[in-house]
Image (tube, grey):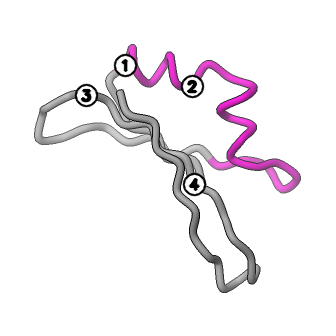
């Protein structure tokens, strides 16, 4: 499993934004993807710090994108 942290500039907010990716080691052609969005006062850090999403993604063999 790979854990990726991306930093990108968002024109809409004129600020640098972080995106987390969890990618399984699967070699299949198709990997299911789950997009997790945080609430209005949260951030992508909430999913990493306050849930077991990395463990769950590894067990299920899915990729997770958390903008």
Vertical order, 39 against 2 (above or below)? below
Q: Secondary structure at mark 2?
A: helix
Q: Which residue is mark 3?
A: 25
Task: Classify residue 15 by image quadrant.
Answer: bottom right
Mark 2 or mark 3, which has the lower sequence index?
Answer: 3
Mark 2 or mark 1, which has the lower sequence index?
Answer: 2
Q: Nearer the viewer, mark 1 or mark 4?
A: 4
Query: In terms of depth relative to the viewer, which is nearer, 13 or 16?
Result: 16
Q: Give the percent coordinates (x, y) of residue 43.
A: 76, 49
User: Alpha-carbon distance for marks 4 and 3?
Assistant: 19 Å
User: Alpha-carbon distance for marks 1 and 4?
Assistant: 21 Å
Q: Nearer the viewer, mark 2 or mark 3?
A: 3
* Residue range highlighted in magenta: 37-60
User: Alpha-carbon distance for marks 2 and 4?
Assistant: 15 Å
Q: Nearer the viewer, mark 1 or mark 3?
A: 3
The stretch drawn in magenta includes residue 1? no
User: Alpha-carbon distance for marks 1 and 3?
Assistant: 11 Å
Q: Which residue is mark 1?
A: 60
């Amino acid at each position: 499993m790979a854990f990726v942290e991306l930093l990108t500039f968002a024109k809409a907010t004129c600020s640098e934004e972080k995106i987390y990716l969890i990618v399984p080691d699967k070699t299949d052609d198709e990997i299911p993807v789950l997009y997790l969005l945080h609430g209005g006062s949260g951030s992508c850090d909430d999913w990493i710090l306050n849930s077991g999403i990395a463990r769950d993604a590894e067990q299920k063999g899915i990729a997770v994108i958390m903008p």
